[in-house]
Amino acid sequence: MLCKMQNVKKLSPRTGFRSILFLFLNMAAMVWTPTATAQTSGSEPTGGMICGTVLLKAGNRPASQVAVKLKSHAAGIFRSVLTDLEGHFEVRNLPPSTYDIVVEEPGYEPTETSARLDGASSNLVLYLNSSNPEQSGRNKYTVSARALMIPGKARAEYEKGLASMVKKDFAASLSHFTKAAGLFPEYYEAYYQAGVVETNLVRLDEAMQAFQTAIDLSGGRYALADVGFGYVLYREGKLEEAVTIIRRGLEKDGSSPFAHFILGVALLRLGREDEAESSAREALLRNPSFADAFLLLSDVFGRRHEYAAQLQGLDTYLKLEPYGTESERARRARELVLGLMAKTSSEH
């Protein structure tokens, strides 16, 4: 089975890197969308790819919005993605290694396989068996069963909203997410995405309300809603509260590199450099190509006057994002770091 290629570009969180003397804390972009992050990359893939489909064995139906965890101890990589509405998933930019792939879903028996990635891609099909067919069909909450309840028109509006977000047509995307929630009032993913849009529009009160609704409707199970809520708190300068809420989300699902990244930025603003560095490295463990995490590391090293390490962080960012929105600022910061290194060397 060939992997399904998505026509959705990654919504990449950006930072405002002011200079080596200041943190890049005027972040203007907002949280990723789950589908875009899980399925695609913002640039051409530079490594291998593992992709496939998760199916419910009963009826051979697609298992949508199910977490697929992929790890390689040898390569030091841990990733987690959500399947799309057709049960597809893909993870890109992977180095050659042997990977363990695990799917664990409430109401179903865990399924696990391994894949040796030697070339460009590896394709998989995984099946979920119900652990209790009688109960899972009636009482147990499962993402897959719930996804089957979402009306087709609501799903279509939701997908249109995601497509509009990629085009940065926020007015249209908000309209689609609002329609999706109207058609299916329990559609907490739609409320979450509405919160993403409102944050991009700098309507933080509305964003916080949307994220809180997503938290309430999901019974507190939807980790992304916690991260979004914490991000708004960060934007409002409520750093301690932001750290608490984002960590709460990470306790539910620690797979998001952006969640670890924004946690690290908040920690650095609080002067907790060691914790900020740890968060940046957690982000890179989950996505080694997450360029903004190297800017965070660069700021951590700058705080410590470790200029060689700071320079390395900037160089890695520029290698990954040579034409990014913050690349010119990073280049100017790099020149300042080189000047400081030269001055320090001459003084010694």
Image (cartoon, rainbow, N blue to C red):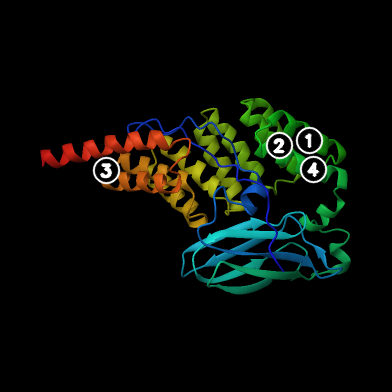
* Separation of residues labelled 3 and 2 (CA atoms): 42 Å
Q: Cβ–Cβ below 8 Å for labels 1 and 2? A: yes
Q: In which quarter of the image is residue 136?
A: bottom right
**Mark 3 lies on residue:** 307
Which residue is found at the position 37% from the left and 43% from the top?
A: 273
Image quadrant containing the N terminus: bottom right
Task: Give whichever of 95, 285 is nearer the camera.
Answer: 95
- Is 74 located above or below residue 339 in the figure? below
Q: Which mark is residue 187?
A: 4
- State the residue in front, 194 or 277: 194
Viewed as shown, does residue 212 lie left or right of 156? left
Looking at the image, is mark 1 or mark 2 nearer the viewer?
2
Left or right: where 117 falls relative to 275: right
* Residue 17 image point, x, y percent: 42, 34
Amino acid type at mark 4? Tyr
Q: Mark 1 points at which residue?
A: 176
Residue toward you, 136 or 24 = 24
Q: Earlier in the sequence, mark 1 or mark 2?
A: 2
Pointers 1 and 4 in contact (CB under 8 A)?
Answer: no
Q: Distance between the residues labelled 3 and 1?
A: 47 Å
